[in-house]
Image (spheres, rainbow, N blue to C red):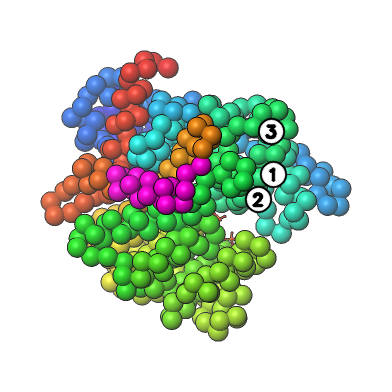
Amino acid sequence: MYNSVNEFMEKVSSKNTAQPEFIQAVQEVVDSIWEYIQDNPHYLYANILDRIIEPERAIIFRVPWRNDKGEVQINRGYRVEFNSAIGPYKGGLRFHPSVNLGILKFLGFEQIFKNSLTTLPMGGGKGGSDFDPKGKSENEVMSFCQSFMTELSRHIGATTDIPAGDIGVGGREIGFMFGQYKRIQNEFTGVLTGKGLNWGGSLIRPEATGYGCVYFAENMLNAKGDSLKNKTITISGSGNVAQFATEKCIELGGKVVSLSDSSGSIYDKNGINTEKLHWIMDLKNNRRGRISEYAEKFDTIYKNGERPWSIKCDIALPCATQNEIEENDAKILIQNGCIAIAEGANMPSNTGAIEKFIESKILFGPGKAANAGGVAVSGLEMSQNAMRINWSRDEVDNKLKEIMNNIHRQCTEYGNEENFTNYVKGANIAGFIKVADAMLDQGVV
Ligand code: NDP
């Protein structure tokens, strides 16, 4: 048994050297739940803390493929099967050059609590590769996906482990991987989510993470008697999550003034309307271009190499990647009058930034709550596949709204402090209880 968070974290750090993102994710959860588990020592006696931070399994494999010149290329593939206490492993695949075991362990660890919050029976997992789809031909992306799935197919299955998309993995990549899985296993099952609509996909799955994040922001504002209407909103990223967060903000009467990619940000003071958003979707999803082209096309400002956080806003939705809001960005957001942050990305705010948000008591929805809509609708896709039925757009959207409301309610139940909801604490405690109780029920496994 540990006497303090520091004592526990020293052990975590020494056992997971060179995995700073994983250590950061564990620290955030343990800080939040420490007091709660001291008051409920049965979790301590069963040593749930040591068990929950250890993946049940982590698979690392070679991914050989040939580029268009016929040259052999080698990437590294991973699947971290973190926790299956409440259901089969579930979590996305990320294809990005920065991918390594530590990043996937952080994402898999976050996924455990997020999936628990959705109320659906899904365990936590994450995977991916250091393969970079940017600048690759369609044929190269397909060759890579087929090779990646050739190995991964041994480890996953519709009742074992069901991957989905994440950074660098959208409908195109899921299609190539699903085709290869079916070819190898000779079965048509719901082994991946985010599938195409006419081969087992769910309506609203592409939209779900972005829409869910905006529903969560609206829930936080509503609890304060406010709403998104007429608010100025900055969003980072311009991929799947950012695009559909923008679409929902526009629908709810907000004005989105920024989007970004890894090269820089655009600032459109008149707001991105539906027509401009469709142009961006075509740019990013079909032409695979850079966000700087928006500034040329619509004669707006482009901030090369900058994130959007210095732009004055009421609400900020970080939807790109981890640690994209640092402490100084948080200070600027607060000084500029920002009243709410909802994280579409996973762990986009670093530890210093979160401290500033909590200290200043602005509304702060952490990723494991605010972006859980994506995996929630993946869970709904699994249900539809199992029942061999398709729900309508409205049915899925209503279920998504209900799930986001429910997550918000759980956060307020466990995160209530004097005149303030600490959503970080609420999400971590609520997510932890369900998984930890299941682990207790299932014995020392
Ligand atoms: P996409 O690949 O569709 O888009 C990612 C966007 O973020 C792109 O605009 C990309 O720019 C930008 N980006 C990626 N890495 C960096 C970086 N290191 N610095 C600056 N910008 C970067 O991914 P998604 O939209 O699916 O994912 C975005 C975030 O949301 C991730 O944190 C992901 O884990 C999280 N998330 C996604 C879910 C989903 O359903 N897709 C579910 C829950 C969370 P560029 O093109 O230049 O690389």
Q: Which residue is mark 2?
A: 172
Q: As shown in the figure, which amino acid type bears the numbered disc 1?
A: Phe
Mark with earlier residue (2, 3):
2
Work out which quarter of the rendered image holds the C terminus and state it: top left
Q: Which residue is mark 3?
A: 182
- Image vertical order of residue 183 relative to residue 403, above or below: above
Mark with earlier residue (1, 3):
1
Q: As shown in the figure, which amino acid type bears the numbered disc 2?
A: Arg
> Could you say where residue 109 lies in the image, as x and y percent from the top left?
44, 37
How dense is the environment of label 3, judged by Cα within 10 Å: few (below 14), some, or many (20 and up)? some
Residue 104 seen by the camera? no
Q: Tell me the tag on residue 176.
A: 1
Q: Which residues are magenta?
A: 390-407
**Picture quarter containing residue 419?**
bottom left
Check if residue 254 falls in the magenta segment. Answer: no
- What is the secondary structure assignment of the residue under circle 2? helix
Give the residue furthest to the top: 443
Q: 438 or 307, which is in the foreground?
A: 438
Q: As shown in the figure, which amino acid type bears the numbered disc 3?
A: Lys
Q: Is residue 32 left or right of residue 264?
A: left
Magenta segment, prevailing SS (helix, strand or loop): helix
> What's the residue at 38%, 26% (across, down)?
50
Contact flag, marks 2 and 3 (Cβ < 8 Å): no
**Picture quarter containing residue 269?**
bottom left
Q: Is residue 354 left or right of residue 421?
A: right
Query: How far is disc 2 from disc 3 in space, using C-alphas?
Result: 16 Å
How dense is the environment of label 1, judged by Cα within 10 Å: few (below 14), some, or many (20 and up)? some
- Image vertical order of residue 234 relative to residue 166, above or below: below
